[in-house]
Structure formats: structure tokens, C-alpha cells
Image (cartoon, rainbow, N blue to C red):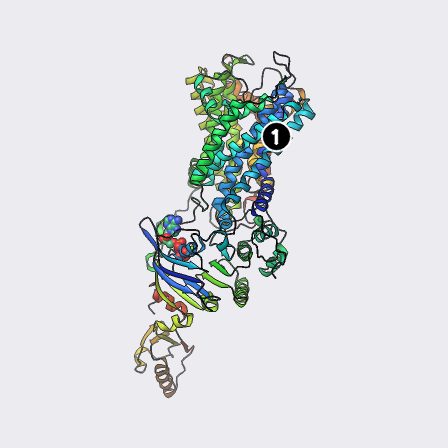
Amino acid sequence: MDDDRPARPRPTLTLSRHAVRAFFRNPMAAFFTLAFPLVFLVIIGSLVGDERTPEGVRVVQFLVAPFAVFGVAQASFSVLAIDTAILRESGVLLRLRGAPVPRWSVLVSRVVASVVASFASFLLVGAVGVLAFGVTLQWRTLPALVVTLLAGTACLAALGMALTSVTRTVLAAQTAAQGLLIPLAFVSDVFIVGADLPGWLSAIGTALPLKHFADAAAATFEPGSGYAFSPGHLAVLALWTVVGAAVAVWRFGWSPRGSGDGRKGPPPAAPAPAEVLRQPSAAATTARPTAVTLLLGQTRFALLGMRRDALATFFTLVFPALILVLFPVVFGSARVHGLTMAQYLLPGMIAYAAALAGYVNLPESVAAARADGVLKRLGGTPLPVRWYLGGRVLCALLIGVLGAVVLSVVAVVAQGVRLDPVRLPAVLLAVVLGGACFCALGLALAAALPRLRSLTAITLGTLLPLCFVSEIFVVGEAPLPGWLRTIGDVFPLRHLMQSLLTATRPDGDGSGIAWSHLAVVAVWAAAGAVVTARRRGAFAGAEHAATPTRPLRIGVAVHR
Amino acid sequence: MNAPAITVRGLVRAYGPVRAVDGLSFTVGRGEIFALLGPNGAGKTTTVEILEGYRDRDGGDVSVLGFDPATGGTAYRERIGIVLQAAGFEEEFTVRELVRLQTSLYPRRHDPDELIDLVELTDKRHVRVKALSGGQRRRLDLALGLAGAPDLLFLDEPTTGFDPAARHRAWELIERLRGLGTTILLTTHYLEEAQRLADRVAVIVAGRLVALSSPEGLRTRGRLPTVITFELPAGTDLAALPGLTGTAEADGATVRVRTHSPLVDTWRLTTWAVGAGLDLPGLAVEPPTLEDAYLALTGEAHDGR
Ligand SMILES: Nc1ncnc2c1ncn2[C@@H]1O[C@H](COP(=O)(O)OP(=O)(O)OP(=O)(O)O)[C@@H](O)[C@H]1O
Ligand SMILES: [Mg+2]
């Protein structure tokens, strides 16, 4: 049964092709490197693209490069680092090491895939920019653009591999990758272009490679003459490439490191002989746990899980706080809709935290527990699944309230925001009702899509654009185009934001409760609850094959 | 067959203070099926992974197919096949895609479709890995290990998670590989598996070899007692039994006699019963099994055989 074709294996080629396919089959990777930058471009391009710079150039001309750079960074840094960590922790790399394949071909194939994905991302964003927004490309700067892309991709890929090499678990790689990239994007001319950053922030940006990549790429979109090569920026990229490659080569590992291969502890003790196990005492059997103890127990458990999930914490609490601190610094005394930047951002960020906790983190943890068979195991215990879900919901609400507290403290202490104590109950009411609404919607989604192991692509993919149309992420003073505003009016996020704005604005009066907005939120909450209740069978976890031998949860809360 | 496929002399591997492998020596002949047995944490996987070239050793000599696995590189890997104890897959790929990828990495290779048929995943060939059951994944693992038509196959707990029918078929597959001259080193917790497949078994406890022989040799070598069981006839008790060379013990009405002279004791019991006009319901004479021998060796026997 031997194959008689004597073809010598060409492992680098074979593995590269395979890695490229793997990349595009991973819905999360495709979402964050292709769809995400595109959505940014389309939304922001529609909002402000036609405004003009002082030189009279349309703003959209300057939007393509930063968003494309972000897509490239996701592909070559985050996705590469995370996927390689997944392959290592699941044992796929180890198996490959057992095949007659040189080590370097495995590594090269990973990098090739990220280069291909990066170019795809850039092409897509560029094409939409040119075709839909009339961005002009200049043939003259094309060589510089290609060289910049290659240098930037190589640099980020080297750093991505270095990151994989120094982390022990997939979760650590995910947290570190996104936790580094997203804040960095704010100070590297990616999310905020040409901002007047305080010295230390701009120093951080200048020291690290992303800003150099973004600036070198942006230069090739500048109208004007010249070939737009940026030797200085390219030199910095080359330097970081060497650093990244050195760390990657020095620390790279093929065997699973952290993900419970059970090899760290002492050998398992032999099970206790039967005599040691006594009958439970009578007292223990008669006191059946009450609903309250069950719910509190589940909540504590959920909170514990949350505390261990640094990535979710980062996105729910640290990220909005970061924006709240950074934006006013960057935009100085600019006023938004008659308020100071911080005063306007605060309610938005509170709404964002509550929505993320309920609509992104909650369904993600439930979907993962379902796919891993945790819900199924739970189904075999006397605990009704509603207490499990109840605990998760309570946890999400607490996180939402905690987010509100943290953000308010930051705003009041560091930004001079004024909050009227009389209207704090209104804030609390909005946070809890809004949080409950997003929990209900998140659970409804998890119930409607029982086969998906990860919902983050869908939840984040809908929540982030909604943040723009709900004016949570402010983009200039101009009013939203009518159709975008209609979308914002339909969904609950904008109403939650408005309720919170009413409760926090310094010039308001009365209780600060915006009944009409809260009513819309309540209607959505009820709709979500009804869907969840009708499809509660989807949480029994029995309907699809859990895979017990799987050594690791792949795709745990992948917020990319 | 001439030079052994595997020679291990004084192998040592420590993880910090734990000496996972502590002076292990054995050889495996070409074409032989050799099983490593031992309790959890005994050092089986560590040993196998050193032989596979995955882990470094702290001491000892190892030669596999004439290579030192630590330095054998690509030439060595072209000739071995590996089924790891626990390794995942890329979930978004189909069975066939992964098998094809793996076969294309070897200069001498099996045909992907034949391999898939061989492990009986034919009707799953176009299914993505994420939809496979636990046992089906293990079979895919086996197919990937066989991709390069190896001279020497390492199987770390190959049939854990298989249903009984699938296990029997896997055994047939392994026997067929033996027929092709493949040398196989396997670890297992199923004594039946070792008994059925292995030419020789090594029992490892805490990194040391405690026994090495054929399964049959292992079973008989420990001089374990044979057990005669029967139900006490109504109206009699232990004291009524005739004198036996072994020791009798009653558990309710069931009597177990442990004896090194089963022939004599059986004869005494049956003549006594026949003489007294009694029946001995459920009379059975059970020689020690491989499992008994294994449990005695590894000191985990709780039933006091
Ligand atoms: N990478 C590692 N780091 C630290 N200790 C390890 C490591 N790998 C194995 N050990 C320890 O070495 C000992 C032997 O482990 P090994 O995996 O070889 O056992 P095993 O015989 O294969 O067990 P099992 O039957 O459970 O698979 C155990 O005590 C284990 O905890
Ligand atoms: Mg093992």
C-alpha cells in the first residue's frame, strides 16, 4: 500500500500551504484581521471621510493606512502568537516535531501564513478604500508600500513568535497579545492619528515598532511627490525584527507548557480504600441547599473564573478606563455635545463595560462551558441549570457595577468630572437594567447558536460597530447620518448610553432617570429573556458531542 | 533478526527532585511488540518520549534503529511513527486533509485513503476534526502515526477511550503491522491488551524495571496462588471442610481457597463433597491472571491475593 510516486516531501511548502488554509478557516482570525479593520474603515470613513484636512485633502485618504496596519498587526502579531500557542498547547507542534521535518520549516510556515494573511488584509482594506471611498493610490509609492508591508509584517511576526515563546498558556498569549496591541494602537498613530500626546506616551509609541510601521505606511498614502520611503522607520522595524527573532529562537518550545497535561504535580495518589469513605452524616443529607445558597455559590464560582480570566477583565474594565484617561489627554479641551470630553465619555464607557460583561463575556463563558461538557456534567447533578445561568448573570451584573464604580472614580479623581450624588441611584438603575438587558441578549444568542464554541466574533463584531452608531466611541462633533442614527435608535445600547448620560450630566436636574430610554432597554431585556427561556434546552449541553479527550479549551474568550 | 531495534542501558531522567526514570535497561528486538506497563506516573511516557527524541535524558545509553534519538534528526524520524498519549489536532480541518498533510511529510508513505480505511474512519473522512468523538480522534491519531509506513511505531496508550469492538479491531490492526515486520513499543493500562499483543512486557514502578518477560512468564513467575471458589452447601460451615493445603476464607456463603496445590485441594474438596452427598454450587478453579501478577508486582493488590 506504499505510494509508489517517489516525490520527495517538500515540508516547508506543504506546511505553509496548510498554515494559510488554517488561518482562513479560523473564523476568529478572519474576523479580526479582515472584517474588523474593514468595519472600522467603513464606519469612520462614512462618518468623517469627506471632511477635509487644512491642506484640502479628504480625511479618508489618511484612514486606509492606519486601519490596514491594524489588520496587519492582528494577523502577524496577535493571531500568529495565539494560534502558535494553541498549536503548542494542544500537542500539534509536538506531533510535527516527530515527523521528519526540520524545525525551521515549521516556524517558517507559520510566518508565511501570517504574511499572506497580512497582505490579504491590506489588499482588502485598500481595495475598499479605493473603490468605495475614492482613496487614491499612487504607483510611484507602490514599491515603498510593499517594502514597508514586508518589513512591518516580518517585525510583528518575529515579535509574535517571541510572545508565544515567553508565554506558558493560550490564555496568557491571548491576554498579552491583545493587552499590548490595543493600547499600543492608541499611542502609535493607528487609532488616533497625529494626536498631541503627552511626552511619555509619545515616547512609548516611538520606542516600539508599531508607530514606525504606521507612519511608514501612512507616508505612502500622502499625496505629493517622491517615493515615500521612510528609511528611519524601516531601520527601527529591522531592529525590532532582530530582537523578536532572537527571543523567539532562544525561548521557543514545542511541548505543551501550561495546559494541564498533569505533569507538574506529584504522581496521583492511589484512591483511598473503601473503608475511608463514610456515609454522610444525617445532618448533611437533610439540609437541602436553598435557592439563595445555590445562586450565591454559583456567583462566587463565576466571579472566581472571571478573576482568573485576565483577558476578559482587561477588555471590560481596563480598556474603557484607558480610553477614559487617554482621550481627554489627547484631545485636550475639546468639547463633545456641549460637555467636556471626560464628562461625555464616562456614561459611554460605563455602558460599554456593562454591555461587554453581559453580551460578550457571559455568552462566551457559557458557550465554552457547554462545548467542554461542563454544562452536561452539571446536568447530572441536582443543580438546575437556571442557577448556573443565574450565577453567571449576577456575576456579569456585579462586573458591570464594578466597572461603573471604577470608571466613575477615575473620572472624578483624575478628570475633574462632577457627579451629583442625588442622581447616583439613577446611574445604578441604568447600569443594572442595562446589564440585565445585555445578559439576556447574550444568553439569547448563546441559546440560538447552540453549536458554536466561541461567540466572540459575533458578539464583539456586533457590539463594536454598535458602539460607534450609539455614539459611545465619539467620532467628531458632526451628527450621525440619518440611517446610522436609525440603527442606533433601534438597539438598546444607545438608550442605555442616553440614560446614563441623563444621570451623569452636570447640568441636569431631578432624579436623572430617563424613563423613555429605560423603557426601550427593558423591552429588549424582556425579548432576550423570552428567547432564552424558550430555548433553554440549548443549555442542557447534551445535544452535541463533547470531546472528552480534548486536552485544552481552544478559543477561550478570544477577544482579538 | 539481527541487531535489536531498541537498546536502552541505565536510562535516567529526573524532573527536579523526581527521578521519573531511574536506571532503566531493556532491549526490543526487530519485529517485536514490546509493552511497557506500570501505574500512573511510573515513567512510561517519559521513557517513550526519550526514545522518540522529544526529551533529553540525564544519563544512560540509548540506541534506536542504530540512531541516538537525541541527535538522529530527520533521518531518524523518517523511520519511526509516533502516537502521543495526548495530542490535539487542528480542529478546522477534515480527517482526510490532516492525514494527507501528514503523509506528505514522509518520503516513504502510505496512501491517505487506505490509511483512513485502515483505522475505519472511512465515513468520517470529510468531517472536520471538531465533530469527531473521543475514540474517533484516537483512531485519527493512530492513522497519523502510521503515515510514514514506519519501521518502528511508538504507541503511548493507543486504545484508551476505544469501545470494546474498536479496541479489538485496533489489536487486529497492530497484529497486521507486526505481520509487515513493524517493531512496536507500546504502553498500556489494559493488561488484556498486553497479553494479547505483546511478545514481552516490562513492568515499571517509580522509574525502575520490576519485571521483564513474556506475558505468560509474568503471569506464572510470581508464584501466585490459584483460587478455588464455591458456595458452602446449606447446613455446613467452614469448619466442616476437609483439611486443605491452602487457606479457606468465607464471605457470606462464598468460600475462597487460595492454594499453591490446586490439584490436591480440588481433589480433597470434591471427594469430601461427593462422600457427604453434597453439591458445591459455582465451583471454579481460577489460575492467577496477568492482572493479579501485575497488581502483586506493583503492590496495589487490595484483595490480598
Ligand atoms: N515535564 C515534566 N515536568 C515535571 N515532571 C514531570 C514531567 N513529565 C513527567 N513528570 C513526572 O515524571 C513522572 C513520570 O511521568 P510519566 O508521564 O512518564 O508517567 P507515565 O508512566 O506515562 O504515567 P501515565 O500512566 O499516567 O501516563 C511523574 O511523576 C510525572 O509527574
Ligand atoms: Mg503516560
Q: Classify B145 as above or below A408.
A: below
The percent coordinates of residue A535 (x first, y second) are 59, 42
* Left or right, residue A498 beside residue A407: right
> Relative to A521, does residue A363 appear above or below in the rendering?
below
Task: Name the foreground residue: A74 vs A143.
Answer: A143
Q: Residue at x 53, y 23 (%)?
A: A231
Indicate left or right for B134 with B293 as reference.
right
For badge 1, the amino acid type reads: Phe
Is residue A503 placed above or below B2 in the rendered structure? above
Residue B60, picture quadrant = bottom left
Q: Position of residue A52 (x, y in %)?
A: 63, 14
State the residue in front, A414 or B96: B96
Regarding mark 1 in the picture, which secondary structure is present there?
Answer: helix
**Horizontal and vertical percent position of residue A456:** 55, 36
**Disc 1 designates what residue?**
A122
> Label 1 is found on which chain of the structure?
A
Q: From this view, report whether residue A121 is shown above or below residue A206.
A: below
Residue A396 appears in the figure: no
Quadrant of ligand 2 in image: bottom left
Q: Is residue B122 visible?
A: yes
> Could you classify mark 1 by the number of other residues whose Cα lies within 10 Å: few (under 14), some (14-19), or many (20 or more)?
many
